[in-house]
């Protein structure tokens, strides 16, 4: 990147504005802009960036529907800005079909626990923490229309990553708890899965700054399958989320969150180009 004193010079900003940079140069400009108010102001001073307009136009057109999903409506009521809501509505894992798929999977797992005994409870415990993981993988996958937007706009990547993760969790966590609580044999497992879910989701997000989202999600899924299978083999599936392992999940969550924070600060968007 042709920079003076760590900043993008005017010629570079002009080329960026006109979408005339090669992808690597454009990426380095985009990595710099969220961290530098001076360069953002100078870019704004050069006139409206056509790339940004085009990207916004594409996203707004892709969204099309006037009705946001229930999860995004809920977040709007909790103080989410209209611009943030627009970004979230472009994420496939937040649309109605994703919510229906979540309901179908968790209903199947919860119903299996009614008369499936310990194997039914094991199925619920296996599925529950993986729903937010899968939601995050889908929300960050590169075929998402959001990926176009992120690669073309100087939107703070860390904020976007956290927003999308929060929206994914808002769309799946209450549903999974509600189904678990409605089926008595599941008992305390209806909330016991939350700690491993936090660990698996932060681990997946951190891994996604290095490897493809589907690979990161698959590895997290395989790891959780091993843990649940080991507990199931001892005839006590609840052992997978007992206080000892829960401490381990908390530790993993903290380390993965710290790692993710460092990676986001150096502009490594989960699922983004690397
Ligand atoms: Zn700068």
Image: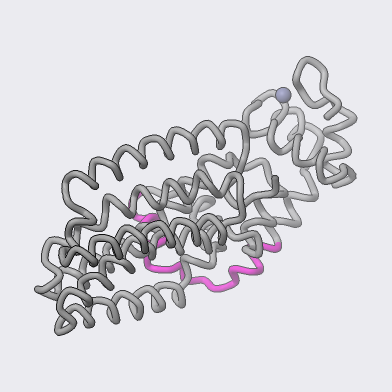
Does residue 88 show up? yes
Q: Is residue 107 left or right of residue 83?
A: left
- Please identify the quadrant where the C terminus is shown: top right
Towards the viewer: 141 or 152: 141
Q: Residue furthest front?
A: 234
Q: Residue at x 66, y 64 (%)?
A: 143
Q: Is residue 272 left or right of residue 78?
A: right
Does residue 74 show up? no
Q: Which residues make up the magenta segment? A: 58-78
Using the image, determine if residue 158 lies above or below residue 71: above
Q: Report the coloring of the rendering.
A: one colour
Residue 138 position in % (x across, y down): 53, 63
Residue 186 position in % (x across, y down): 15, 70
- Please identify the quadrant where the N terminus is shown: top right
Q: Is residue 121 magenta?
A: no
Q: Main secondary structure of the magenta part?
A: helix
Q: Is residue 65 magenta?
A: yes
Residue 55 position in % (x across, y down): 71, 56
Q: Residue at x 87, y 36 (%)?
A: 14
Q: Residue at x 40, y 35 (%)?
A: 255
Q: Quadrant of residue 116?
A: bottom left
Q: Residue at x 78, y 44 (%)?
A: 49
Q: Residue furthest bottom?
A: 115
Q: Is residue 61 left or right of residue 46?
A: left
């Amino acid at each position: 990147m042709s920079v003076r004193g760590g900043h993008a010079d005017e010629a570079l900003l002009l080329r960026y504005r006109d979408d005339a940079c090669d992808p690597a140069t454009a990426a380095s400009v985009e990595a710099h802009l969220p961290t530098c108010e001076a360069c953002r102001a100078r870019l704004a001073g050069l006139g409206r960036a056509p790339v940004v307009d085009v990207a916004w136009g594409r996203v707004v057109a892709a969204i099309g529907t006037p009705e946001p999903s229930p999860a995004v409506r809920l977040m709007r009521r909790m103080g989410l800005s209209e611009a943030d809501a627009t970004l979230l509505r472009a994420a496939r894992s937040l649309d109605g079909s994703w919510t229906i798929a979540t309901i179908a999977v968790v209903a199947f797992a919860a119903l299996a626990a009614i008369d499936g005994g310990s194997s039914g409870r094991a199925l619920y415990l296996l599925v529950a923490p993986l729903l937010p993981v899968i939601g995050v993988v889908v929300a960050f996958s590169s075929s998402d229309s959001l990926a176009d937007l992120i690669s073309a706009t100087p939107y703070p990547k860390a904020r976007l990553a956290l927003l999308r993760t929060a929206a994914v969790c808002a769309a799946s966590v209450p549903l999974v708890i509600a189904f678990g609580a409605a089926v008595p044999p599941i008992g305390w497992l209806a909330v016991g899965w939350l700690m491993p879910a936090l660990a698996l989701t932060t681990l997946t997000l951190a891994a996604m700054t290095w490897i493809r989202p589907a690979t990161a999600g698959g590895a997290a899924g395989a790891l959780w399958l091993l843990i649940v299978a080991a507990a199931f083999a001892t005839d006590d599936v609840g052992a997978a989320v007992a206080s000892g392992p829960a401490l381990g999940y908390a530790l993993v969550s903290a380390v993965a969150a710290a790692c993710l924070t460092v990676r986001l600060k150096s502009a490594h968007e989960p699922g983004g180009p690397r």
